[in-house]
């Protein structure tokens, strides 16, 4: 039974969410080494509690709540665009069940508790997730960054067009001053690349930004190894060799090895 403020206490007085959610995290996520997921997976007990409430809603209402959860902005215009310009009462049952409300000041949709939003996402199937992301990509046709984010989430197989859009988005993100997000976007671009040369270039670009802008040298060797496997051509080898030399010089200061790597790569071109 949820308390008035939305917490779910257990018999010992400890909020159930604090006991259940950490069980769904990896050791690195619990220790702070790895970032938390955007939406938390729910433990069995919390899943049962919130599933019972969400399951009473109609399919159109659950679909609209999934769109709201995946969008995350609460912008009613997005939901109205999908839901017939807001002419229907699709969200009405969710509001009456006190799962969501419209904030009087911001006029945005707000989930009554973050765990309700997580439950909506967690209970949807993979195909429902992809369909929702595809719908959101269509809605954000005039916002290239949001559009490609949802296109990428809806894409399960390599797709050269989506990969190119992601690469372009990564550099827009970088120019806005978020190198970590730029690296993440480039890595997803590499995953969706259909050509080995494109995958290798994007992996190398991600490694370069990680090393040069963020100073994160730990993943560079792994990324360069993946880039070499994706495209062992001399041109690709030169790019990875230059980056490896950069890491060596800024890490161990191994000038001789850095020089040898670059010279060997140049001789192979």
Image (cartoon, helix red, strand yellow):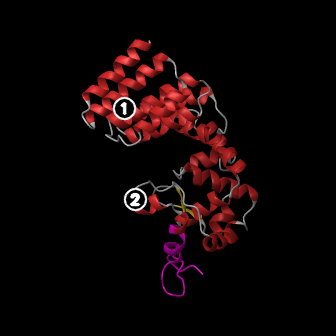
For the residues labelled 2 and 1, say whether their Cβ atoms are less than 8 Å apart: no
Q: Which residue appears at 64% of the width and 54% of the height? A: 66
Total marks placed? 2
Q: Which residue appears at 66% of the width and 59% of the height? A: 91
Q: x, y percentage for residue 118?
A: 58, 61
Tell which of 219 and 30 is nearer to you.
219
Q: Which residue appears at 50% of the width and 29% of the height? A: 227
Q: Which residue is mark 1?
A: 175
Using the image, determine if residue 57 lies above or below residue 134. Answer: below
Q: x, y percentage for residue 198?
A: 54, 24
Using the image, determine if residue 200 lies above or below residue 263. Answer: below
Q: Which residue appears at 67% of the width and 62% of the height? A: 92
Using the image, determine if residue 16 lies above or below residue 240. Answer: below
Which quadrant of the rendered structure holds the C terminus?
top left
Q: x, y percentage for residue 258?
A: 31, 26
Task: Name the disc covering residue 32, or none.
Answer: 2
5 lies left or right of 160: left
In front: mark 2 or mark 1?
2
Sequence-first disc among 2 and 1 = 2
Residue numbers of the magenta segment = 1-22
**Other-residue count near label 1 (Cα within 10 Å), few / some / many at <14 / 14–19 / ≥20:** few
């Amino acid at each position: 039974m949820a308390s008035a403020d939305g917490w779910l206490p257990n018999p010992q007085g400890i909020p159930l969410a604090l006991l259940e959610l950490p069980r769904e995290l990896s050791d690195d996520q619990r220790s702070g080494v790895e970032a938390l997921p955007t939406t938390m997976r729910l433990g069995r007990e919390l899943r049962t509690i919130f599933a019972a409430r969400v399951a009473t809603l109609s399919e159109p209402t659950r679909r609209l709540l999934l769109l709201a959860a995946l969008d995350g902005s609460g912008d009613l215009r997005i939901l109205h665009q999908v839901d017939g310009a807001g002419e229907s009462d699709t969200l009405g049952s969710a509001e009456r069940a006190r799962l969501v409300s419209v904030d009087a000041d911001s006029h945005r949709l707000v989930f009554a508790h973050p765990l309700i939003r997580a439950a909506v996402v967690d209970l949807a199937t993979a195909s429902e997730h992809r369909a929702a992301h595809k719908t959101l990509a269509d809605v954000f046709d005039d916002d290239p960054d949001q559009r490609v984010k949802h296109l990428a989430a809806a894409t399960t197989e390599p797709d050269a067009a989506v990969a190119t859009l992601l690469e372009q988005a990564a550099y827009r993100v970088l120019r806005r001053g978020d190198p970590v997000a730029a690296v993440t976007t480039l890595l997803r671009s590499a995953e969706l690349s259909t050509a080995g040369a494109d995958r290798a270039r994007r992996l190398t670009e991600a490694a370069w930004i990680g090393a040069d802008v963020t100073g994160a040298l730990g993943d560079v060797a792994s990324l360069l190894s993946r880039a070499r496997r994706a495209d062992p051509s001399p041109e690709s080898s030169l790019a990875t060799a230059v980056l490896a030399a950069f890491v060596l010089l800024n890490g161990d200061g191994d000038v001789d090895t850095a020089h040898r790597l670059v010279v060997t790569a140049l001789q192979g071109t």
